[in-house]
Image: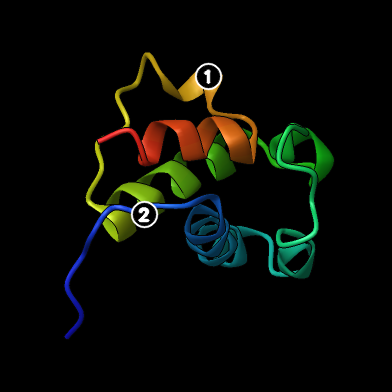
Amino acid sequence: MSEISPPTSLAEVRNHLERAIGAVAPDVVDEVQSLDADLDFFEEFGLDSMDRLTIMESLVAGTGVAIPDEVVPRLTTIQALSDHLTSG
């Protein structure tokens, strides 16, 4: 069993996001690694509010980093996610 630890780089955040998106939108998962870090991935991949909830829950479970509800609306880009998840 692997230990949960917060990501320390943008690349690690992409990997966590790729797994989270794969659970809700497997048809776009291959595009996560090449998506510009400043683009809104929810918009780019056509994800809805339920997808957002599932992705955020998966990121919390996979990284051990809390994502408060009030922060979620600002975490729409890979860079914003990385800034939040690696700031601890």
In this rendering, which labeled residue sits more in front, label 1 or label 2?
2
Question: How far apart, in angstroms, are the residues tagged by discs 1 and 2?
Answer: 20 Å
Left or right: where 70 falls relative to 76: left
Q: Amino acid at mark 2?
A: Pro
Label 2 sits on a secondary structure element that is: loop
Dot 2 crowding, Cα within 10 Å, few <14, some 14–19, many 20+: many
Give the residue at x 50% y 36%: 81
Label 1 sits on a secondary structure element that is: helix
Give the residue at x 52% y 67%: 19
Residue 76 is situated, as x and y percent measured from the top left of the image, at 62, 30
Residue 83 is situated, as x and y percent measured from the top left of the image, at 46, 32
Residue extending furthest toward the front: 9
Q: Quadrant of residue 61?
A: bottom left
First in sequence: mark 1 vs mark 2: 2
Can you say whether 13 is above or below 41 in the image? below
Number of numbered discs present? Answer: 2
The numbered mark at residue 9 is: none
Q: Quadrant of the N terminus?
A: bottom left
Q: Quadrant of residue 23?
A: bottom right
Residue 22 is situated, as x and y percent measured from the top left of the image, at 60, 67
Can you say whether 3 is above or below 10 in the image? below
Left or right: where 8 falls relative to 43: left
Contact between marks 1 and 2 (CB within 8 A): the answer is no
Left or right: where 73 falls relative to 32: left
Give the residue at x 36% y 54%: 7
Q: Quadrant of the C terminus?
A: top left
Residue 54 is situated, as x and y percent measured from the top left of the image, at 46, 48
The numbered mark at residue 73 is: 1
The residue indicated by pointer 2 is 7
Q: Nearer the viewer, residue 71 or 37?
A: 37
Q: Nearer the viewer, residue 31 or 5?
A: 5
